[in-house]
Amino acid sequence: AQSVAQPEDQVNVAEGNPLTVKCTYSVSGNPYLFWYVQYPNRGLQFLLKYITGDNLVKGSYGFEAEFNKSQTSFHLKKPSALVSDSALYFCAVRERDYKLSFGAGTTVTVRA
Amino acid sequence: EAGVAQSPRYKIIEKRQSVAFWCNPISGHATLYWYQQILGQGPKLLIQFQNNGVVDDSQLPKDRFSAERLKGVDSTLKIQPAKLEDSAVYLCASNPTSGRPQETQYFGPGTRLLVL
């Protein structure tokens, strides 16, 4: 069975500081990993995904994520956070024909 | 390119009433998904369509939930009768082709349901 965990319910950072949102996964084969962001009263917006190849994936709005197979992690990062990055972030994993499984989400608050 | 459209955006009903949600996926997208997102949790898949056929409805509570995609384009999700625990955001998503695992799913804005 596949699963994904986001160990932090909340992440608080100051504007201009680096932002990291953690994600670990469990699959029996090769994972396909996704990050989505959700703003209040909005649907999920796709940020980036890892399929294969380069372990560092670059996505929308200056976000990137690093796939680490040995640590089974796919942490989302942004070098310099903006107040507008405050939102709910979801990591998701999919393996073979299984359904897309989401983590519980991490609320990011960036203070001015 | 227009995104996934959903309506209504908000709905308040009393328990035991019925409710229906509508979704129009991105034009040309063959695969359509309905998710339930309960407050404080990640979205959970209810049903997946490939064109007008059901691919996966293993987590759909079939005693009260039903969904259809008759012409392989837009879709409706119905709850009858609703329970308090059905209060959630119902998200529709689509992707272009066969729903392969590496394909990105594109989400609509969701319908927020409150059952009183």
Image (tube, coloured by chain):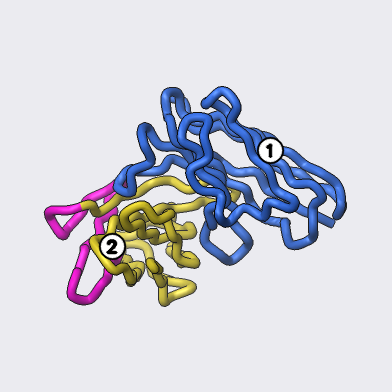
Chain colours: A yellow, B blue
Image location (x, y in percent) of residue B115: 80, 54
Image location (x, y in percent) of residue B111: 65, 44
In the depicted structure, whether residue A56 falls above or below residue B35: below
Residue B7 painted magenta: no
Task: State the residue at coordinates (43%, 46%).
Answer: A45
Q: Is residue B50 visible?
A: yes
Q: Give the distance between the C-alpha atoms of the residues marked 2 and 1, in whole angstroms.
A: 36 Å
Task: State the residue at coordinates (56%, 45%).
Answer: B34
Going by the numbered disc 1, the residue's amino acid type is Phe
Task: State the residue at coordinates (63%, 51%).
Answer: B89
Residue picked out by circle 2: A77
Q: Chain of mark 1?
A: B
Q: Nearer the viewer, mark 2 or mark 1?
A: 1
Q: Left or right of B27: which side holds A66? A: left
Image location (x, y in percent) of residue B88: 67, 55
**Residues rendered magenta in the picture:** A52-77
In the depicted structure, whether residue B32 falls above or below residue A63: above
Image location (x, y in percent) of residue B93: 49, 41
Residue picked out by circle 1: B21
For disc 2, the neighbor class at 10 Å (few under 14, some 14 to 19, many from 20) is: some
Q: Left or right of B90: which side holds B52? A: left
